[in-house]
Image (spheres, rainbow, N blue to C red):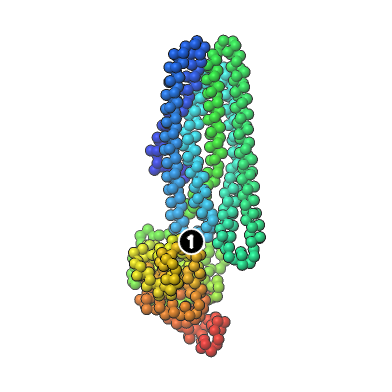
Amino acid sequence: MLTRLLRTFLFPYRALLTGVVLLQLVAVIASLYLPSLNADIIDNGVTKGDIEYIWKTGLVMLAVSLVQIVCSAVSVFLGSRAAMAAGRDMRGALLHQVGTFSAREVGYFGAPSLITRNTNDVQQVQLLIVMSCTILVMAPIMCVGGIIMALREDLDLSWILLLAVPALGLSMALIIARMVPGFRMMQTKLDAVNRVLREQITGIRVIRAFVREREEVWRFGVANNELTDSALRVGKLAALMFPIVMMISNVTSVAVIWFGGQHIDNGTMEIGSLTALLSYIMQILMSVIMASFLAMMAPRAAVCADRISEVLDTESSVRAPERPEPFVEDPGIVELRAAEFSYPGAEEPVLEAVSLRAEPGKTTAIIGSTGSGKSTLLNLIPRLVDATAGRVLVGGTDVRELDLDLLRSQIAVVPQKPYLFSGTIATNLRYGNPDATDEDLWRCLEIAQAADFVREMPQGLDTPVSQGGTTVSGGQRQRLAIARALVKSPRVYLFDDSFSALDLATDARLRQALAPVTSDACVIIVAQRVSTIREADQIIVLEDGAVVGLGHHDQLIAECPTYAEIVDSQLAAEDAR
């Protein structure tokens, strides 16, 4: 999976990577040439007292070192550019893919995990690319080149290499094999820490209201300690690597000096050759060490690549049609024909055989007990989820045959939990229409009963809004979300219990102001309060996902026991009738 991911996202930057390989090749050749020059200085300059030769060869070494430095620096620069660009593309691809997900896929992965995959996981893969550009290219060239140059200096001592290199490689392989499960566990524990932290930040008011700070600190501590324990287990294995590498390197150096000294004593080897051989052996071992270091990073990057690919390979249950169909009638006409929705593996459907028709200029209300499927029904219309049976039509065309952008351009949704983005009030309102003027914004704020409190703010439309809209109250947030929908001027308005945080007087004024603005549009309201929907043209009563009542207020009181029970629970009998 890691190889496929790298191949996909590094392919556009193959020119940069080619440059990295060529420059690293030159840098390694220069590095391998330096010990040979140093041996020549010792054997032909120092031992013979030839100062001129020392100077000439020293200048050559200086030039070779300069070439090595320049090539290494440029290759690191090019490799870093390729890695950063690939990371940027990965994050963009993840964000685009998540943007296509329906509520089902988002719920399956969970927001904390998706955030971790788009940040920490991509960063780990990005780091592997950077290190690969500097180590993966250099290590094999240096290892092979070092062996060739070492054998060129003294063939009789090659048996030391035959023992040292496999011993070092085998040791690293055994440690890395035990680290892979640890890295996988670390990423899972990191997801858990992010989830707990996100819950605690989002629900800080609830935590304080129920005096649960101590319990939440304990819960975070458990998740944090589990992550720490996983990291420590991996860290202890990683800590073994450096002592093992140093032990093998030092034993190898001692062996070379010991047996090389005997060769010098016998006159079969020069001192410079022994020095060069030591340098080459250290270069060979260093290449193995670098490869081991890269191999240590690769397992964690592989785990992260699996998690990234899992998101990229997951297809949304809401798919855009290959050949979109146009609207065949007014896009303000919404119709459900025996629509059903079930979650995968669920024993009972959330919605069952729901049929309704909502037309422009009319208000359709949906009411029912908690969990009756009201919000799910609303989500079927803009294809936030797809019906598992039956049909949903907008403008006379099945929503599964419409272009998603075309469909959603005709619909404005005010969700049950209105969400405001970080920015200003104006930027949030223009989310529905980027070209809206300030006059348009103020007009929509007036209709949504939000103009008064916005005018009282020091900066008016330019007042900053924090992420989620936490700087305003729940009622203000709902009214701003309604104003944002009005700015869009769609053909279909979907209000998902969008008046619940308003007092009865504000609710009444808002619905009265909405009536002339939405007179030529289709309005569908999900509500819990009967007072909000009693004037609707038709009211649909849901119970356990099925339609048990359809009609206007007075008719349903007389004919639908479920609706009558809801009314009796909210209003005095004389007010209801």
Residue beneath label 1, please?
467
How many callouts does the rendering have?
1
| Residue 223, horizontal then vertical, whole percent | 62, 53
Q: Can residue 339 be seen in this snapshot?
A: no
Q: State the image coordinates of residue 354 (x, y, percent, origin top left).
A: 48, 73
Residue 269, horizontal then vertical, whole percent: 55, 13
| Residue 487 in the figure: left or right of residue 541 | left
Quadrant of the rendered image containing residue 455? bottom left
Residue beneath the point at 60% across and 19% down? 257
Q: Residue at x 48, y 40 (%)?
A: 129
The kind of secondary structure element at disc 1 is helix
Q: Check disc 1 and give the amino acid type.
A: Gln
Report the residue at 59% width, 38% height from top: 176
Label 1 packing within 10 angstroms: few (<14), some (14-19), many (20+):
few
Residue 250 visible from this viewpoint: yes
Q: Give above or below for 390 relative to 541.
A: above
Name the one closer to the observer, 38 or 8.
Answer: 38
Asked if 65 appears above or below 305 in the picture, the reply is above
Q: In the picture shown, does residue 443 fall above or below 312?
A: below
Which quadrant holds residue 180? top right
| In the image: residue 187, left or right of residue 456 | right
Residue 557 to residue 327: above or below: below
What residue appears at the point 40 percent right and 74 percent down from the top-left corner?
Answer: 446
Query: x, y (%) of residue 392?
Result: 42, 69
